[in-house]
Amino acid sequence: MSTPSRGRLRRLAADVLAAVWAGMHSNRALGEHLELHGELSPADRGFVTHVVYGVLRHRLRLDAHIDAAARKPGGLGPRLRDLLRIGTFELLELGHPPHAAISEAKAATRAVVGGGPMAAAVGGILATVAKQAAHRDAELDELPLLDRLERRYSIPRWWAGRWVRTLSPDRAIARAQAIARPPPVEVCVAPHADLETIATTLAERRTHARVVRIEGVPRGLALSAAGDVFYAPEATAGDLWVQSGPSQRVGHVLDPQPGESVLDLCAGRGTKTQQIAALLGGRGRIVAADVDPRRLDDLRDRLAAGRIRRPDGGLEVIVHDATEPVPEPWREAFDAVLVDAPCTGLGEAARHPEVRYRRRFEDLAACQARQRSILTEAAATVRPGGRLVYAVCSTEAEEGPDVLAAFIRDRGDFEVTHTETLQPEDGWSAGFFVARLERRIDAA
């Protein structure tokens, strides 16, 4: 396999970033672009992935360094700025020697925009960035908290303002630092598999990876520097699957028991459905529903491939808009109902860093209206004595506690038996709000 030409990997990273800015999800943009370059080594693919996510996590800070170093920052076009962001990320976060990072950036610039003057300008800006890096970060660290969160930690100003109002300064900075770090790959080990054996095998197969248990998640493992686990033999056999620790925690709050009937109302690609099926131990019934049939295709594929153990009562996959009234056969039919509701996704800002730039304050109200509608319709599917779990991958009050409070005000037949908020600064890989409600046995 030949070594990539100078600057080629940076050009590829810039292509991915351009697709993200145009609206694609980062994981999809990376997947599609890397698929076009199957000749790249795992190390090169890993480098491109690391750079793309690094630029997304640190974009506003990188821009602060670039703007301070450039004579006319407003004149930098989108393509040129992305190449500068990549070079600045290499200097600030990867610790690459300035001469190497600058040389690669200039080579990428010549290939993308052509001409020596542009490449020379990029080299000059990055040389200034390298020279002033420590001083510039020290300046950013001395800014008032709101400005520091925005310019030093790349938290958009509207979101940072909420943190300033609701969190202590130390807590706000800790949260910003937590979502700036690459999260580990997290997997759920099926109950039928031996957890310690799986952990040992994963560590032996990936000599550079660190494998640890996830606190508060009985079957969860976190792997750093693990690469792609989706196609590991254990995953193919259904002994484990990729699922974040907070997502696994939601499944344990639902606590499906063998023999129960369970509805996963916003199933998406079915990761939690797979966890529910494993916890049922082959006994029971599952209905997995989602409004988007394309998201359900992955669930069907894993089911067909035998990665998911179908319970004896069956696993039915159906398309349904959860904001609409449920069909009659579903009403009061389930022992346990999971609503992992559509939300802003701000709790996933570490794993999907582009979300921080795409969300606006007004999105909270729009999401809340939909969440309240879904929770109301979900309640009609819970049998008397059954339980309902509401979860969102967001820690914003409008999407969690406020939705729950409104529901309880409107319904007298449910009571809240458990709530928890998982925060990145407390060691979780994502921010989640989770609540369990039980329907009174005398409800009719």
Image: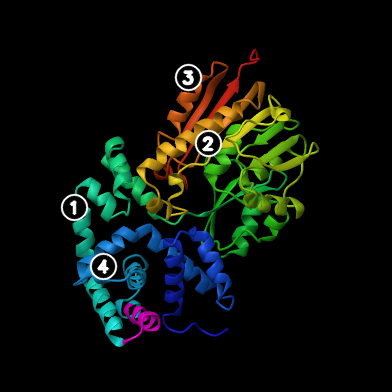
Q: Position of residue 442 (x, y in %)?
A: 65, 12
Q: Residue at x 46, y 24 (%)?
A: 406
Q: Would you call the spot at circle 2 few (<14 residues within 10 Å), some (14-19), or many (20 or more)?
A: many
Identified by mark 1, the residue type is Glu
Q: Are marks 1 and 2 in contact (CB under 8 Å)?
A: no
What number is the disc on residue 409? Answer: 3
Does the image show residue 8?
yes
Q: Are marks 2 and 4 in contact (CB under 8 Å)?
A: no
Question: Which residue is under mark 2?
Answer: 391
Q: Give SS at disc 2.
A: strand
Of pointers 1 and 2, the one earlier in the residue sequence: 1
Place residue 318 in its image quadrant: top right
Q: Residue at x 30, y 76 (%)?
A: 98
What number is the disc on residue 66? Answer: 4
Place residue 172 in its image quadrant: top left
Q: Which residues are magenta?
A: 102-115
